[in-house]
Image (cartoon, helix red, strand yellow):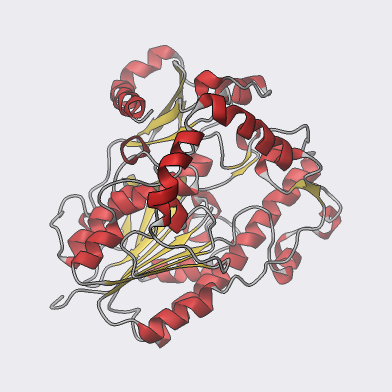
Amino acid sequence: MATQPNVIVVVLDTVRADRVSALGYDRETTPAFDAFAADATLYTDAVSQASWSVPSHASLFTGEYPSDHGATITRPVLTADAVLPELLSTGGYETYGISPNSYVRPATGFARGFDEFQMCSGVTESAVAADILGPPVNWVTSTAAVRQPIERLFTASRTKGAVTTDPDAPADNGVLDRVSDVLDRADAPFFLFCNLIDAHLPRSPAPEYVDRFVEPELADAPIPESERAYTMGDHELADRSLTRLRQLYDADLRTLDDKLAALLDRFRDAGVLDDSLVVLVSDHGEHLGEFDRIGHQFSVFDSVVSVPLAIQFPDGGPDRIDDQVEIRRLFETVLDETGLQSHPHRSLASGIGDDIARGSYASPMVDIEQLLWGDSVRYDPEFLGESLSFARTDEAKLISFDGEEWLFELPETADGSLPKLARERYAALSESLELDRQLAKTML
């Protein structure tokens, strides 16, 4: 293009790839995403670098793995040197951020480089909040003696009585009106980052989609309000409850997709949709009973790291990319498309896939091996910051925690770990994981 394109990045928070109808799901959960992807480039095997918001968004904003940028559950305030909004602002872009996600906010380091960053909670925070809060918060959360009582108290608060049969309908968080306000004022070229969080726990779909997606006879089946209420508590999900939880998730997706449709209409009405670089991507997915997990903590299985991705390139791009790609490459893609830096082979417009995709979850004090395979919770301060890491090809995945490794053929199943002999075929995965382990140790 002759001029720099506007850049719009919409994060579809907590959307897992295999529940998206454009990616083969047999229920129409995402018609707006599907229609956008039909006229854009659809990536059918996109992999997030983390399973929850802070490290995943940090990878999008820095192009780095969590073990490099250091923003994890152990050190949750982003302190990386160069972030995408700063680079775009320096390059002449007006920069705007809108987030209803309480983890993606100025206090956690995500407002740097933004001319405006609006929290949908109504709370006003300065971008310098992270400079003030970051060092003590990161020290507290990464110090075992301090973290342990906090961890136990948080778990207790989230597990006591945290079961419901009647999820609340979604509240209007004001995202659409805030976007419209920005579009009325923004001058080209601008960068707009927006997070849509409607698919996140607690399950709270619009009533019309409860009627469409959830069987009426399941209305009395109780479900947890939070993932810790299930994972760390003494609650169990009967088959009826698990089925209801999955159906409510589908209803949540359709609720989010309606908001996405309205958002795209506002871009279209403002005349900025067709000529902009527009990215629709999820930061992570969601467990719906796989490996006896719900939510997206304490895991790097594909349910939480396999995500939807579609990109509209201003000058056009491929219709579909089936090769595996890491979503952290959006950082280089934006810089390349705006002409601020040249990354022709790293840009996702190239169609080049990633032979190996990596990512991690930095555990607090939970023995994840015991949680997954022993079906119980054990705290140990030595696990604070221990990396639950994965390395993935398009056909196999190696997961490592505390010296133990599990190799899976894809798609993963709880009893599908391959014998050690088969690992010779995937030696590069072990080498890649070792790199991640060494980098993670430097962050503690």
The quadrant of the picture occupied by the C terminus is top left
Q: Is residue 333 left or right of residue 383?
A: left
Measured as percent of width and height from the top left, residue 243 is found at 73, 47
Measured as percent of width and height from the top left, residue 292 is found at 66, 33
Q: Is residue 110 left or right of residue 288?
A: left
Q: Is residue 366 above or below residue 196?
A: above
Measured as percent of width and height from the top left, residue 12 is found at 49, 60
Residue at image location 75% in from the left, 59% down from the top: 214
Of the pair 242 and 67, the residue shown nearer to us: 67
Measured as percent of width and height from the top left, residue 36 is found at 42, 70
Residue 350 seen in render: yes
Residue at image location 26% in from the left, 80% down from the top: 188
Marker count (numbered) = 0
User: In the figure, residue 370 lies in which quadrant?
Assistant: top right
Residue at image location 36% in from the left, 38% down from the top: 70
Q: Is residue 190 left or right of residue 251?
A: left
Of the pair 421 and 187, the residue shown nearer to us: 187
Residue 322 seen in render: no
The quadrant of the picture occupied by the N terminus is bottom left
User: In the figure, residue 97 lies in which quadrant?
Assistant: bottom left
Q: Is residue 361 above or below residue 131?
A: above
